[in-house]
Image (cartoon, rainbow, N blue to C red):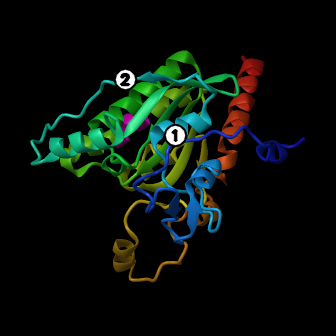
């Protein structure tokens, strides 16, 4: 059996909460946010939040992503108490953070922790676009850095699911410096010969796409994910050219060599498990 056949294996279905902010819901029905196709909630959960007509992968909450990715009961959260401050005294910033905390049940736009995939230990980070659009501030950068350092210390792979609008403007340069800080931690992880897998989901933009999201040993993405740095209109005005219709999509990036593969959500867990097992066995053989 070759590696492509392994990726297509079936797996046990898991259920997760509905993405309330991503689709217009009724009591039993919802609309796809892309094609407006009406689906039953029960059917939507069975296909992991993917439209059965157009294949659009709706944004996921961090806890739901963890539930369909890691071995059941294996997740142990790291640094859950880290909370945002307002070092620049940006007006209304903390009020917006607290509102998102109440809305999502999260303390910040990322959840990190230790867990297992297919029995193999990993450290994982999941960004959540429902919290401040997944923007990267000091706490997000610190949690990623600590998670990478934990993976390096344990000698295990690090996996991140990105979903972000970029750097958090309310924290100014303190937000931008997280690009360098996280990248340095990942370089130290790589220097130990350890695996880093980046999974880019919709949307992955701005400073996140320009730093840790794009430097994985293996860079994956979900279908049709928006991935890019500056916005389409800004780029077109700068270069004075019309961009392709599929510009800044996962498919465009794959075609131009910036991704290793596009993996449907239903196959993501098995794909990650295969890569982790291959790396773990290879490291043990050469160790």
Q: Is residue 77 left or right of residue 175?
A: right
Q: Label 1 crowding class (10 Å Cα cut-off): few <14, some 14-19, many 20+?
A: some
Determine which residue is flagged by label 1.
Answer: 64
Name the residue rendered at 62%, 63% in the picture. Answer: 55
- Residue 174: tell me if it is visible: yes
Q: Secondary structure at mark 2?
A: loop
The percent position of residue 49, horizontal first and vertical second, equals: 57, 53
* Residue behind mark 2: 79
**Left or right side of 267 for 94:** left
Helix, strand or loop at disc 1?
Answer: helix
Decide which of 111, 4 is in the foreground and name it.
111
Question: Residue 73's quadrant in the figure?
Answer: top right
Rendered residue at 37%/64% (across/down): 230
Between residue 9 and residue 52, name the one nearer to us. Answer: 52
Please state the extent of the stretch shown in magenta in the rendering: 179-184
Name the magenta segment's main secondary structure: helix
Q: Is residue 287 above or below residue 177?
A: above
């Amino acid at each position: 059996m070759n590696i492509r056949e392994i990726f297509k294996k079936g797996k046990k279905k898991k259920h997760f909460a509905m993405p309330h902010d991503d689709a217009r819901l009724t009591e039993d029905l919802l609309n796809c946010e892309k094609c407006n196709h009406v689906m039953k909630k029960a059917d939507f959960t069975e296909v992991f939040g993917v439209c059965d007509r157009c294949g659009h992968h709706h944004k996921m909450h961090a806890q739901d992503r963890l539930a369909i990715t890691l071995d059941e009961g294996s997740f142990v959260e790291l640094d859950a108490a880290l909370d945002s401050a307002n070092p620049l005294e940006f007006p209304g910033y903390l009020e917006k953070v607290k509102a998102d905390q109440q809305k999502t049940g999260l303390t910040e736009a990322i959840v990190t922790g230790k867990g297992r995939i297919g029995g193999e230990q990993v450290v994982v980070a999941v960004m959540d676009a429902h919290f401040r659009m997944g923007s990267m501030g000091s706490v997000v950068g610190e949690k990623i850095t600590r998670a990478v350092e934990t993976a390096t210390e344990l000698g295990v792979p690090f996996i991140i699911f990105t979903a972000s609008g970029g750097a958090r403007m309310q924290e100014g340069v303190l937000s931008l410096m997280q690009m360098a800080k996280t990248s340095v931690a990942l370089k130290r992880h790589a220097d130990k010969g350890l695996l880093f897998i980046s999974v880019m989901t919709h949307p992955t933009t701005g400073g996140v796409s320009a730093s840790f999201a794009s430097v994985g040993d293996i860079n994956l993405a979900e279908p049709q994910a928006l991935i890019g740095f500056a916005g389409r209109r800004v780029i077109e005005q700068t270069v004075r050219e019309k961009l392709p219709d599929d510009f800044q999509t996962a498919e465009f990036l794959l075609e131009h060599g910036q991704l290793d593969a596009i993996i449907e959500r239903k196959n993501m867990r098995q794909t990650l498990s295969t890569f982790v097992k291959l790396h773990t066995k290879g490291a043990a053989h050469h160790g």
